[in-house]
Image (spheres, grey):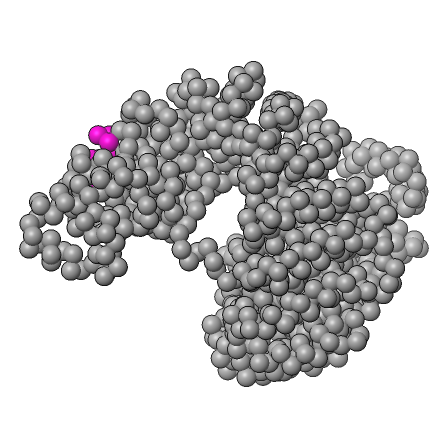
Amino acid sequence: MKMEWKPEQEGLRQILTLLKESQSPDTATQRAVQQKLEELNKYPDFNNYLIFVLTKLVTEEEPTRSLSGLILKNNVKAHYNSFLPEVAEFIKRECLSAVGDPSPLIRATVGIIITTIASKGELTSWPELLPALCQMLDSQDYNVCEGAFGALQKICEDTAEILDSDALNRPLNVLIPKFLQFFRHTSPKIRCHAIACVNYFIMGRTQALMLHIDSFIENLFHLAADEDPDVRKNVCHALVLLLEVRLDRLIPHLPNIIEYMLVRTQDPEEGVALEACEFWLSLAEQNVCREVLGPRLPALLPVLVRGMRYSEMDVILLRGDRDDDADDAEPDRESDIRPRFHKPRSHTIKHNGAGDSNMSGGGESDDEEEGGADADDGSLSDWNLRKCSAAALDVLANVFGADLLPVLFPILKETLFHEDWVIKESGILALGAVADGCMGGMVPHLPDLVPYLVVCLSERKALVRAITCWTLSRYSHWIVSQSHDLYLRPVMTELLKRVLDNNKRVQEAACSAFATLEEEACTELVPYLGYILQTLVYAFSKYQHKNLLILYDAIGTLADSVGHHLNKPEYINLLMPPLINKWNVLKDEDKDLFPLLECLSSVATALQSGFLPYCEPVFRRCVSLIEQTLNQNIANSQSPDQFEAPDKDFMIVALDLLSGLAEGLDGHIDHLVVNSNLMQLLYQCMQDPMPEVRQSSFALLGDLTKACFQHVLPCIPEFLPILGMNLNPELISVCNNATWAIGEISIKLGSDTSKYIPLVLNHLVEIINRPNTPKTLLENTAITIGRLGYVCPHDVAPVLHQFVRQWCASLRNIRDNDEKDSAFRGICQMIQVNPGGVVPDFMFFCDAVASWSHPKDDLKEMFTKILHGFKNQVGEENWRRFTDQFPVQLSARLSAMCGI
């Protein structure tokens, strides 16, 4: 018999003193405690003391004992594999003996230690754990049963995959039926644990659960009306997961489940209502949604719109009830400012036709999915019943389209004109939530609704003004397409007043809404530019930190939208001083540089030569930011203990601003590049392991190639092999920009491109033939193949047959422009070198030629020559049989263009 371990009194006393001290709020004491703990960790049996205090020392207060357990948990996490075997065994034994401790806090702490050990040794090194816990579930002692369940729930959460593997002899075959028995236990806490345990296995379609799926569903129904809110919440969560994974099993019960969820979405406990509300989001993704939910929309929509109201608690937190809600003099709390994400540059191509005027109300942006919920209550918890209800209405509007409106209109009539501002506000949110899905059906009502919303922008309550900004922005596509005097001008005028509102939440909503309006209106805003700029520039002096970041975005979007119209001395003199002032104040390590650099990048591209007076300091700082980041990265990789890794976003944003400068200043950037080490830095950035850095490097390389090729030329032998290695379509944006840069370089390099073609051509042909390649990448690939064929027809023409059909199909939808021009010249030259390569797919070539609106005369002549040559080759009779297969429109366009 080996001796049972016993603590020494002196050691115990030291540890207890330490535990007491560690509860002191004083930081110096805290630091001393940390240091002491590190020292004690050198003693092999220190962890024995910790578990002893937790499980045996009932004379101490519970928080002290629990703290001892949490320190032990951290030690297990950090060093469990180096514990002595007898220490590890002692801890395991003690844990199992204390699972049923009378104190809920101690039981929970023991459960945490158990799951931490289990996830360390993957359960395999503790084979008796699961059988022991499983046996304890049957104990008559409530504490033992609850403690064992608590531990099992944590293990299921942390190691669901391992439990469902052969490694452990498939314990779930025993555990899942066992859990199901406890769905009917008398204690709500235990019913709760039981459902939670099973829920962890739904998404993985665990075999053991799938065998018992009907019994699981039956047991859930049995608990549907449970008096305990946590049980109801777990039932709702289970049904939401099952809807995604085992719809087949729920179908017969769906009508009942829908009725149940209608009641639960109105549960007095917000947690239950929120979990139930997720069900509608999930159901909208299923094909059966229209059929099963259609008849119940009249019951569901009022519930969702009611769920969109601010709760009394929200109103207090958001100070929504005050009329004097000027808060813009209070400084922002840093914790309120969410991290921003920079979206690196990607080279895209303008399209013809339908794609431009999609009536989706909000263009392509995905950042407004949450039914306006994001536009208005940043300081509340991220996801709540209001946001979930609005999101559900949004997705259902997309499922049902205009069919939703007959049900929604009576609700809107009642809410929009209600005297209680909270109800009115929810109606305005609902109106915005359905904009995307119901746009077509809303159009006849917008002439009345838009002026009404414009009036709501002056409402007394700030929260109503804020949501109205968002809802108007959701209809901006329609507003911009109507008479300016009736809609665009009043909407814009009132929104700009709200940009200068005294309430920060309204400023934020108005600024975001205005940016959306700018994207839709584009050059329609040109007549109002002076007025817009005066407002936005005035906001600079008024805004606190958080909203400044949104203001940069509104200014950048304005520049993107109106382009060179911004290049007028009076506009430049308004706009540039405040921007440069901020630029000078910000330190190199300040993350507020990101949105400012993005904004300047748009402004530089729009102003073109108008940006010249400002370009030198901006250029120099960008180069310096890139250099600092690269140097810090090298320092960090050589000695990670001394230097922390840099935030590479600084480098990405700087590369993108340089692209904007190169694009805007064109040849004027030449003297800046010549006096810098930018090309060496770019060579390093192009090889960075982080894809976003490479993506932005290739964009800059393409823009520099267009602006000042003489500085790119000496680097081509080093650069092109790197571009060739990045033609990997798994990283879409990297591949896209590398492809585009290759095309730009080939145009400048001319026939000298020939020796580099073997590095890139096979990859490009592979990408253009790959199924499911995104449209932008296909188009850029086709243009680059065309350009390579333009400068080196003899190198590319031999493989014409491998790509010509996909090539024609991917370029038929893009607008006439220089890129398309050079690419089509290339295809014509390749056809002249290898006419046989196009014969099987000649119809596709004819279709692509017909996609031109106004080709240049010499290009039109090339088309004509090829078509007539083909006709003469096959003879009159065959040509007629061939053209009879053409759609009427195609024949008409070709005969108009090429007289054939």
Where is residue 670 shown, x and y percent of the image?
51, 21
Q: Is residue 116 above or below residue 408?
A: above
Seen from the viewer's position, the closer of residues 210 and 435 is: 435
Q: Residue at x 55, y 32 (%)?
A: 608
Q: Residue at x 88, y 56 (%)?
A: 62
Magenta segment main secondary structure:
helix
Q: Residue at x 70, y 64 (%)?
A: 454
Where is residue 195 shown, x and y percent of the image?
65, 70
Decide if residue 51 is in sight here: no
Q: Is residue 880 above or below residue 598?
A: below
Q: Residue at x 82, y 53 (%)?
A: 502
Where is residue 511 shown, x and y percent of the image?
69, 51
Q: Does residue 898 appear left or right of residue 1 in this picture?
A: left
Seen from the viewer's position, the closer of residues 764 and 855 is: 855
Q: Does residue 125 appear left or right of residue 94 in this picture?
A: left
Seen from the viewer's position, the closer of residues 238 and 507 is: 507
Q: Is residue 539 above or below residue 583?
A: below
Decide if residue 784 is in sight here: yes
Seen from the viewer's position, the closer of residues 645 and 350 is: 350
Residue 349 sits in quarter: top left
Where is residue 217 shown, x and y percent of the image?
57, 77
In magenta, the rendered stretch is: 793-802
